Amino acid sequence: MIHTRGLARSFRAKGETVEAVRGLNFDIEAGSVVAFLGPNGAGKTTSLRVLTTLLPPTSGTAVVAGHDVLTDPSRVRNRIGYLGQGNSAGRNFQVSDELITQGRAYGLSRAKSRARAEHLLTTLELEDLTKRTVGTLSGGQRRRLDIAMALVHEPELLFLDEPTTGLDPHSRANIWEHVLRLHKELGTTVVFTTHYLEEADLWAQRVMVVDHGRVIADDPPEKLKADLAGDRITLGTADRADAQRAAELARALPTVHDVTADETEVRVRIPHGDSQLPVLLRSLEAAGVRALTARLARPTLDDVFLNLTGRTLRESADAAAPTTTHDGA
């Protein structure tokens, strides 16, 4: 569904060249759900804007839904849906009119546009709001309308740029329920960005981590967490001597990532901690070291970001510089 090679996009800002996207090489299969994640300014939104033909690439190639974004942008647009960070519908227009107009813009007949609008309004639980003006809708309702507008022409590929930012947990869950149902029913390929890591963890079949315009990790979320972050084992011991001895034994495990110890506690980061914890406890027992407590914690995608970039995704979002104008992600 998406094929990129050496895809790059740069800007001129204050007399300097800013490389927002640097040589992206990836393929996304049809029917998949892919999270495109990274800190603010990493190049996520710029990448999506290039893939949706809103920005031309500086160099490299991208074939989206079977068509080149640079030489055949109109056919790319006919086959994709795009939900940007802003709202799509005009505040002063009626909900149903906006959807019908969107369908007409994609070349659908008036009858087909009306039928699609009615179907989507029902599917996204907006059927009671057809005559309301967009500006009177709640944030969650407006976001569901944005999704309807992106889907009115039944695209094969749907891009969602931070679709649930600023919404309450109920509205976020509601939007994902609808998106995933449409994905299941229509086989739509979904590519999305988000700063809510649990969304990527729950819904994405594949996570691509971007930093400084490059893909630095690309795997299913469970594999990323296991390989890049690892499970966390915490052992409590009786005294400092036992803690130091336990740390030495933990460092001898073949797949261990990191071991730290203080006065009475040892912290171990290791893949597949559920199978490694019994091995470690047996080693301690054989060495005469007593573990008073043992805890196993699964990693999160924030742990993955910390391991990859030295910061968490949420820290990056909170500390985003206001001068990041070309990539609002």
Image (cartoon, rainbow, N blue to C red):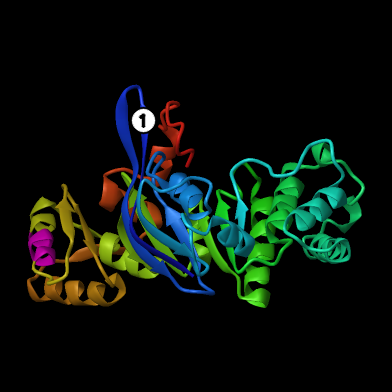
Q: Quadrant of residue 91?
A: top right
Residue 29 visible here: yes
Mark 1 secondary-structure assignment: strand
Q: Residue at (48%, 57%) from the top-left corner?
A: 69
Mark 1 surroundings within 10 Å by alpha-carbon count, few (fewer than 14), some (14 through 19), many (20 or more): few
Name the residue nearer the viewer: 320 or 9: 9
Q: Is residue 286 magenta?
A: no
Q: Residue at (12%, 59%) from the top-left corner?
A: 247
Work out whether 31 lies above or below 90: below
Q: Residue at (35%, 60%) from the top-left corner?
A: 299
Identify the magenta region.
Answer: 245-251
Q: Quadrant of residue 82?
A: bottom right
**Dot 1 amino acid type:** Arg
Q: How many marks?
A: 1
Q: Residue at (69%, 58%) from the top-left corner?
A: 174
Q: Main secondary structure of the magenta part?
A: helix
Side of 314 where 282 appears, left or right: left
The percent position of residue 327, horizontal first and vertical second, equals: 45, 39
Q: Which residue is mark 1?
A: 12
Residue that extends furthest to the top in the rendered view of this protein: 14
The percent position of residue 7, horizontal first and vertical second, equals: 35, 54
Work out whether 86 lies above or below 24: above
Name the residue nearer the viewer: 54 or 97: 54
The percent position of residue 194, horizontal first and vertical second, equals: 51, 50
The percent position of residue 288, horizontal first and vertical second, equals: 9, 70
